Image (spheres, rainbow, N blue to C red):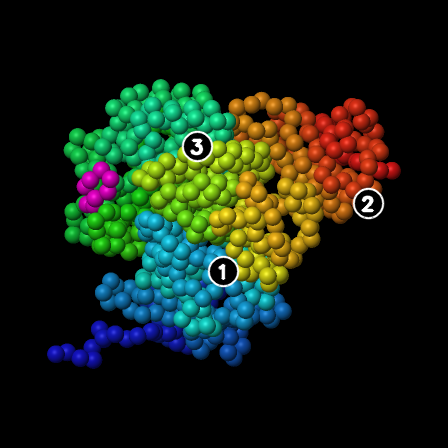
Amino acid sequence: MITNTELEYKGDLFPSKIITFNKDGDSVYFQTDNNVILKLTVLRDSLIRFRYTTKGYFSKDFSYAIDKSQSHGYNVLEVDEDKSFYTITTSKVICKVGKANMQIVITDLNGQVILEDEKGFHWEESYQFGGNIVKMSKAARDGESYYGLGDKASHLNLKGKRLENWATDQYAFHKDQEPLYKVVPFYIGLHHKEAYGIFFDNTFRTFFDFCHERRSVTSFWAEGGEMNYYFIYGPQMADVVTTYTHLTGKPEMPPLWALGYHQCKWSYYPEAKVKEITGKFRELRIPCDAIYLDIDYMDGFRCFTWNKDYFPDPKKMVAELSEDGFKTVVIIDPGIKIDKDYWVYQQALEKDYFCKRADGPYMKGKVWPGECNFPDYTNPAVREWWAGLFKELISDIGVKGVWNDMNEPAVMEVPGKTFPMDVRHDYDGNPCSHRKAHNIYGTQMARATYEGVKQFSYPKRPFIITRSAYSGAQRYTSSWTGDNVASWEHLWIANIQMQRMSISGMGFTGSDIGGFAEQPSGELYARWIQLGVFHPFCRTHSSGDHGDQEPWSFDVDVIDITRKFVELRYQLLPYLYTMFWEYVTDGVPMLKPLVYFDQEDPQTHYRTDEFIFGNQILVCPILEPNAQGRRMYLPTGNWYNYWTGDVISGRKELWVSTDYDQIPIFIKEGAIIPKYPVQQYVGELEFDEITLDVYFKQGKETSMLYEDAQDGYDYNKGRYSLSTFRLKGSENNLVIQQFKEGKYTVPYAKYKVNLLALPFKVKRIYIDNERAEFESVAFDGKTLIIDKDFTELHITAE
C-alpha cells in the first residue's frame, strides 16, 4: 500500500506572495512564487478582466461568448505600488492587488468598496479529469442583492440561492429547479446604491452561491477550465447591463413580423390541419404572423426532409400560407438519423462531421428519429456545411424561420440525458471533451443555423429561435424558456424568466403561452396571453398531448380577451420595434425589472411581478385565479392608469381593480406612445396615418419612434427614420418638438395626436410657429391630425 504520495487529495490551493509584476499595454501581469499568474486587463475604465493560471503560462485565449467586433478603450490606466498592494487606477475604479496573497479589492473613486475577495481565487487539482476545479469567493456586503444569471426559475433577487449552470432538457420543470436549458454565467450585484457585474466566462459546469452556504460570502466555481471573469462597474444597473451586452454582443434587427403573434403546437399536420388553424385565426380576426411545424412535418423525423403523405407539396402550401399573411417556421434538431439512404447522414459521414467518443467511434444516441449521430457544431467546417443544408427549406420552399430544439444536447434513455463526457469536440481548433463543449453546443448549432438562414433569406432578415444557449447566443438567435407547465406557478415563473433574460443580455425571449405540458384552464390561458403580449417573443405553444390550446379551444370570453390583447400588441408594434432598436443599438434591455428602473428605492429590490415594457409602459400581470384586481407597487414618478386615465403618484403600493379582460397597465406621465392600426398580420394594410397617444405632464419627457422598411438591411446604410419627441407641459401650454434623423421615408403622411388628460381648454394651436385653425387639423377637443414632418406643435390655453 502506497501512502503520502503527490496524488493524494490536497484540498484547496491558494496563490502565495507575488514575486514579479509587469505592465504590457492594457494588461498587468502578476506572478506568485507558487507559479500562479494573474493577467489583469483594463478593457474600459469600468470593465476589467481577471484571468488566472496555476501552471506558469496561459493556454490559448479563446471564447465563444465575447463579441470580437466590439471595440474597447479606456481613458486612464495607472499602476502604483506600496508595501502591501499594487494599485491599478482607471477613471472609474481603483483595483488593489494584495502582494501577500493576490487578493483583490475594488473600490469606487471615493473609496467605497464595490467588490472584495473573501478567499479570492483558489483551486483544487482534479486528477480524475486533469486540470483544476477553479474557485472564487467574494465578501458579500451589507444588504447586497443579486440579479441576472439568465434562465432561472427562481425569485428575481437571487440572494440566498445556489444555482447550477449546465444546459439540461428539463421537461416540466418546477419553481427553483436547477439546472435549466440555458447558461448565462453573469450576475449583477447591488449594495449601497451601487451596482456591478461579474461575467464568469467558463463553459464547464459552473455554480454560483449567493450567500447560501455562508451568509457573508458569494462564490462561483467551475469543474474545469480557467478562472476567467470580467468585472463591470456601474454604478447604475443600466450601465452594467449595457456593458455586458456590448461585451457579449447584440443581435441585428429582426423582421417586424417576428415581433407579431405566433402559433405553434406539437404537432400541426397534415396540411389540411395547418390550413384549418390559420383559417380560423383569420375567421376570428385574431392577428397572427407565424405558424410553426414541429417534427411531424419530416419524413421519419429526418431533418431537412418532408413527409409527403402529410405535406405533398410543401412549396405550394408555404406560398399559400404566405398569401394569407402567415410565415412558416419549421423545427430542426441536432440528431441525424443513422440511415445509409438518408442524404444528410451520407454527407456528414463522408465528411467525418459527427461527434466522436474518446476512443474513436461516433457518438450514438437515441432521440426522435431513433438512433442518431450528432454534428460537431464547434467545428467551423461543420457549421459551414450545416448552413448550406438550409438552401431548399429557405430558398426553394420559402420557409421564413427555423427553431432549434433538443440542442442542450438532449439524448433520451441515458444517464444525464446528454452526451457522455468523453465525447470529443473541435472547439474551433481547441480540441476538448464534452465537459467543456456541452454548454455551448446549442449556441453553436443556432449560430450555424443563423448563418444558413441568413444566407438563403437574403436580402431579408433571418429569424432563428433556440432552446439552449450560452452567453453571446443573442448575436444569432431568439429563444424560449423550454417545456414549461400549464400552471399558475409557471405563469409566475415566466414573468420572472423574461425579466431576468432581458437584463442578462438575451432580450428576444418568450415562454410557451398557456404552458407546454398539461392543459390550462380558460382563465389561466387568458391571464397568460395578457402577459405574453408584453414579452419580446410572443408565441402560444403546447405539447398536443394534453388537449387543444388555440384561443378558440376555450369559451368566447377567452377568444375576446385574446383578440383584445393581441390587437393591443399589434397596435404597439412601433413602440416594441423602437425598444428593439434601443437593444440592438445600445444594449438597453427591452424589459426592465423595477430594481433596474429605480435601484435607489429599496422597495424595488425584491419585487418580482411588475416590470417596465420599454421605457414608459408599466405592466403587472394577474398571477392567481379568481382575481378582481391585485396589490402592486408603482415605482417613482407619476403614472396613468391605461384603462381609467387616472394619474397616480409612485413609490407606493396600492390595490388596483381590474376586470377579467384587463391587467394593470400604467403609462409614464409625459410619454408619447406610437400606435399602428390593427392588422391581421404585419404588412396587411397600407395606412396614411399612425397614432401618437400623448400623456400630459407638467414638466419634460422624451419619447422615441424608430422605423425602417421592417425587413432587409438598408437600415444599416442609414435608411431608417428616428423621431425624438420632446414634450414640455405647463399649466396652460403643451409643446411637443420632433427631431428627425435617418434617410428612410415612412409610408404614411400624418400623425393622429391623442391628447390625454390635458388640464386646460385649448384656445390656439401652432404648428411650426404658424397658427392652425381647428378645422385644418380636424381638432375635436381631444385629437388632431398633423403632418408627420412637423418640427414643433404648440397647444395653448392662452
CA gap, disc 1 and disc 3 = 37 Å
Q: Secondary structure at mark 1?
A: loop
Query: Which residues lie in the magenta part?
Result: 364-371
Taking the spot 59% from the left edge, 61% from the top edge, the residue there is 603
The residue tagged 2 is: 731
Badge 3 crowding class, 10 Å Cα cut-off, few under 14, some 14 to 19, many 20 or more, is: some
In this view, the mark in front (1 or 3):
3
Amino acid at circle 2: Glu
Above-or-below relation of 200 to 448 = below
User: In the picture, which quadrant includes the C terminus?
Assistant: top right
Residue 575 visible in rendering: yes
Amino acid at circle 1: Asn
Could you tell me residue 255's position as x and y percent?
49, 32
Above-or-below relation of 326 to 612 = above
Numbered circle sitting on residue 565? none
* Relative horizontal placement of residue 157, taking residue 63 as reference (left or right): right
Q: Earlier in the sequence, mark 3 or mark 2?
A: 3
In the image, 93 versus 295, the foreground residue is 295
The prevailing secondary structure element of the residues shown in magenta is strand
Taking the spot 73% from the left edge, 31% from the top edge, the residue there is 783
Residue situated furthest left in the rendering: 1
Taking the spot 42% from the left edge, 54% from the top edge, the residue there is 153
CA gap, disc 1 and disc 2 = 41 Å
Numbered circle sitting on residue 552? 3
Amino acid at circle 3: Trp
Above-or-below relation of 17 to 275 = below
Rendered image quadrant of residue 202: bottom left
Q: Earlier in the sequence, mark 1 or mark 3?
A: 1
